[in-house]
Image (cartoon, grey):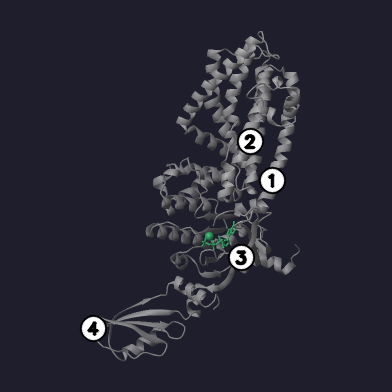
Amino acid sequence: MPTYWTIAAAAFRQYSTYRLATVAGVFTNSVFGLIRASILFAAITTAGGELSGYTIAQAATYVWLGQALLAPIEAFGTREVSQRVHQGDVAIDLLRPTSFLGLYYAQKLGRAAFLLLGRGVPPLLIGALLTGLALPEDPLSYLLGALSLLLAITVAFLTDMLVNLTAFWLLETRGLTVVYTAVMNLLSGFLIPIVWFPDWLLSIARATPFPSMIQTPIDTLSGRVPPLEALPLLGTQLGWTAVLTAAALLMLHAGVRSVEVQGG
Amino acid sequence: MNLPEQSSTHSARLAVELVRLRRDYVVRSPVAGSRRRRRQVVRAVDDVTLRIDRGETVGFVGANGAGKSTTIKMMTGILQPTSGAVRVLGRDPVPERRHLAREIGVVFGQRSQLWWDLPLRDSYRILGAMHRLTDRAREQRLERLAAGLDLGGFLDRPVRQLSLGQRMRGEVAAALLHSPELVVLDEPTIGLDMVSKEGLRRFLREDRAERGTTLFLTTHDMGDVERLCNRIVVVNSGTVAYDGALDSFRERLGAPRELVVDLEEPLDVLTLPTAAHTLAVEAGGIRHRIAFSGAELTVPTLLTAIGSQAAVRDLSLSEPAIEDLVRQIYSRGGRL
Ligand SMILES: Nc1ncnc2c1ncn2[C@@H]1O[C@H](COP(=O)(O)OP(=O)(O)OP(=O)(O)O)[C@@H](O)[C@H]1O
Ligand SMILES: [Mg+2]
């Protein structure tokens, strides 16, 4: 454990050195939050003050929590692992006496912690000032929300890792990353809440791990779904964590044995 | 695999055991005018058998594409052999890769195992945690490494700001931090200037003398082999073309050594034994350059022969460069 803690702390420190990127991230995040909030407000006002269970205040909370999660979830996908596979640097990772997945997960947690504090919390505060937020009444919501957030980051890490690990077999994974990002932004409930989907799309979304990445932590944290009802959602997140971990381990196992580590 | 009793106790003494090791790469190359790709098998390593005792220092040399890096990848467990057996420190590298990673230190000259954006010192903190070193053990070892490899000046600088030579010394320190039993270096001196090369070699010798490590290195710099290794293995097209002690390597090839003598009085011609011949006469007959086979003729015999004809004022002897010898092996079709 201290090993992974040290790795996570190093990733946190590393990301904290990218100051300009942090400022730029906070700025874009806040601007897009404002745009998204005004579109949703217009839709809700047109619908008469409430749309499928969302009031103006709830929509504002939904938007700003979503903006806050964007960075730590890394909704636009990462390319580090696939690039390291393609350039053969994965050899270095495989020669570490730590588990490959554990190493990257620890790095992800350290990075996510920084991205949450550095890039997630500021837009949330800005949102609270500009549009106000609907905060949960039950203190349990915060606790479950934090847990759900951790699981969301985990599920997003694992799905992204699966996409990256295809690099063991595919020479080009960029196309897959683009598709992944598009599908993830829609089905995760980031663009609009999944309960606003038509039924058929909603059932598709619920059959994927994507809602576990954004919709679930937002609902749990905001208290829109009360703690008791949030428990099964967290159970779903846990289930996906188990399934995706198994899939990633399988892919890694097969990949390492079939791979021809590139470059002399 | 069921190894007989006797061979397994023998294996325990060996640091590295490669038996009939082979690795094929499947390459698919596009064919003009067709959507299909042609499947082609490249045999990178072909039947390599090699046994290295603990404590040996082996230089693994050969031309580009001879199969050196491929062999190292199989030894470290990141590449599955096509056929043959590998045992490193008594372990099967592929299934026991992570165990092995605790016992060996590896440097791939063209890859970095350091954390690019963090101060160099942080990389050692992380590596120390990965290898479960106590803070005290890590700091003590780092102090030794920093002194020997001269890292002091840049331990607190981010790795991305280091020069190539500084980074390479940092890489070697990273591979040695956990005091591994076997050190595998794939082109460790690539891109280093003469001073850095010498510094690195000196430290590797010292560290080896202190801890009795096994050293296995590939290089295109014969100075590395001459200064670090007592055994040389030459690979050619994936097979072992020579394997033996460094000294006998020179002798077996009967490689011409060169003797330069300065005479008291000028002399146009020196009569020499059959295994020697004059390469050049310079300075009006004062300086004679003589090539001779080290296997057939000793230096005293040669000097006696010269001394009977003229008085010698000064002399120097140069050893053949190993890269010339490797070239000779290749020109003989890869066989001695
Ligand atoms: N991933 C790969 N896919 C296909 N062929 C490969 C691959 N890696 C190496 N080869 C081929 O295998 C052979 C041996 O390569 P290797 O990298 O082991 O050589 P080397 O002895 O380390 O050479 P160098 O001195 O240039 O580093 C070469 O012919 C090379 O083209
Ligand atoms: Mg090589």
Kind of residue at badge 2: Val
- In what element is the residue under mark 1? helix
Q: Give the foreground label among 1 and 2.
A: 2
- In what element is the residue under mark 4? helix
Residue name at image x 60 percent, y 34 percent: A109
Asked if both marks, 1 and 4, belong to the same chain, the answer given is: no
Mark 3 Cα-neighbour bin, 10 Å: few <14, some 14–19, many ≥20? many
Q: Count the marks.
A: 4
Q: Earlier in the sequence, mark 3 or mark 4?
A: 3
Residue pointed to by mark 1: A251
Q: Earlier in the sequence, mark 1 or mark 2?
A: 2
Q: Say which chain tag 1 marks.
A: A
Residue pointed to by mark 4: B284
Real-space CA distance between mark 1 and mark 4, rounded to the nearest whole angstrom: 75 Å
Kind of residue at badge 1: Met
Viewer-closest of A35 and B311: A35
Real-space CA distance between mark 3 and mark 4, rounded to the nearest whole angstrom: 53 Å
- Identify whether B67 is placed above or below B119: below
Q: Quadrant of the N terminus of chain A?
A: top right
Asked if both marks, 3 and 1, belong to the same chain, the answer given is: no
Q: Position of residue B213 (x, y in %)?
A: 55, 60
Real-space CA distance between mark 1 and mark 2, rounded to the nearest whole angstrom: 20 Å
Report if the beta carbon of the residue with label 3 is closer than 8 angstroms to ligand 1.
Answer: yes
Kind of residue at badge 4: Gly
- In what element is the residue under mark 3? strand
Residue pointed to by mark 2: A179
Q: Give the foreground label among 4 and 2.
A: 2
Q: Position of residue B329 (x, y in %)?
A: 51, 75
Report if the beta carbon of the residue with label 2 is closer than 8 angstroms to ligand 1.
Answer: no
Quadrant in which ligand 1 is drawn? bottom right
Q: Position of residue B152 (x, y in %)?
A: 41, 47
Residue name at image x 53 percent, y 21 percent: A123
